[in-house]
Amino acid sequence: MDPTSDQLISVGLVFGLMMLSAVRGMLNRSGLIAAAIIGLTVSLFGHWTWLTILISFLAVGSLATLWRYEEKAALRVAEENKGARGWKNVMANGGVASIVAVFNFILDQPDWAYLAACASISVAASDTLASEIGSLDSRTRSIINLEAVPAGTNGGMSVTGTFAALAGAALIGFLSVSLSSITDVNIPLLTLMIAVTAIGWLGCQVDSILGALLENRGLIGKHSVNFLATLFGALMAILYHARFL
């Protein structure tokens, strides 16, 4: 596919993202602006397949947010405004992918860049599904000391949340494999699937640890935790690529 066609697809995807988000209420006004910036950066400096994976995460994450929303609201563990994300949430979950896209444009290293971008999104998807689905599981324990904690506690982990985290990471792994042939990526498909899934799940655990150690103490906020966890995912992917691929 020629570069012009890729760019047209990229712009079309960003426009579609704006329309879908506005109609479905997935993003508020600041979130829409941030999503436009992130979307154009990721798709034009990276590839439109990256944005496709990012949009898929947004869609699945929004559905997970609305799942049993009233119950989560009653427990005060639900996202505000029916889950309409703002710019901080968009930057926290997609900012690392956009940074990777810029480095990809400068260095022209599609293999590690694609792996890093997918891994960062995998962390975001894993954490979102773990939080939204696991927040109603009463079998929640602290990831630090395994003591029982209320459902929805920062740094809490549950059986349901753990499996939801794995499902979220595996979904992004599957999408990464499915779309990799469209780009110039030459990573073996099984390796790509395992790496993106494993890093995504591990990144979710890092998010929980940061939440327990730093967010609960008021040292950093939720969005900073999310950003650092996705950054961990990207860095782990780059390290894995450098060491094993």
Image: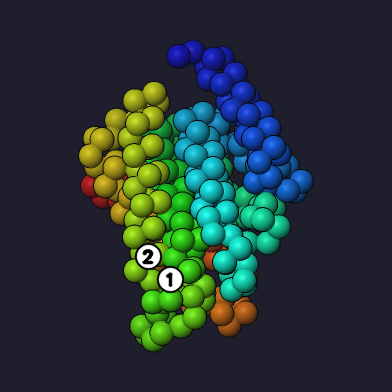
Q: Secondary structure at mark 1?
A: loop
Q: Is residue 245 above or below residue 47?
A: below
Kindly report the distance in space between the C-alpha atoms of the residues bearing marks 2 and 1.
6 Å
Q: Is residue 224 above or below residue 10?
A: below
Relative to 65, is 161 on the left or the right? Answer: left
Relative to 225, is 167 on the left or the right? Answer: left
Q: Is residue 47 above or below residue 192?
A: above
Which quadrant, please, contains the C terminus?
top left
Q: Quadrant of residue 184?
A: top left
Residue at the image point whose x is 53% and y is 20% from the top: 6
Query: Of callouts 2 and 1, which one flags the residue occurring earlier in the amino acid sequence?
Result: 1
Q: Residues within 10 Å of mark 2 (few under 14, many from 20)?
A: some
Which quadrant, please, contains the N terminus?
top left
Relative to 23, is 55 on the left or the right? Answer: left
Residue at the image point whose x is 38% and y is 71% from the top: 158
Q: Position of residue 164 (x, y in %)?
A: 39, 58
Residue at the image point whose x is 49% and y is 39% from the top: 56
At label 1, the amino acid type is Asp
Q: Residues within 10 Å of mark 1 (few under 14, many from 20)?
A: some
Residue at the image point whose x is 71% and y is 57% from the top: 81
Would you say the residues marked 2 and 1 are in contact, meaning their CB atoms lie under 8 Å apart?
Answer: yes
Residue 228 shows in this picture:
no
Q: Position of residue 107 (x, y in %)?
A: 47, 35
At label 2, the amino acid type is Thr
* Disc number for residue 160: 2
* Disc number for residue 137: 1
Q: Position of residue 70 (x, y in %)?
A: 61, 63
Q: Secondary structure at mark 2?
A: helix
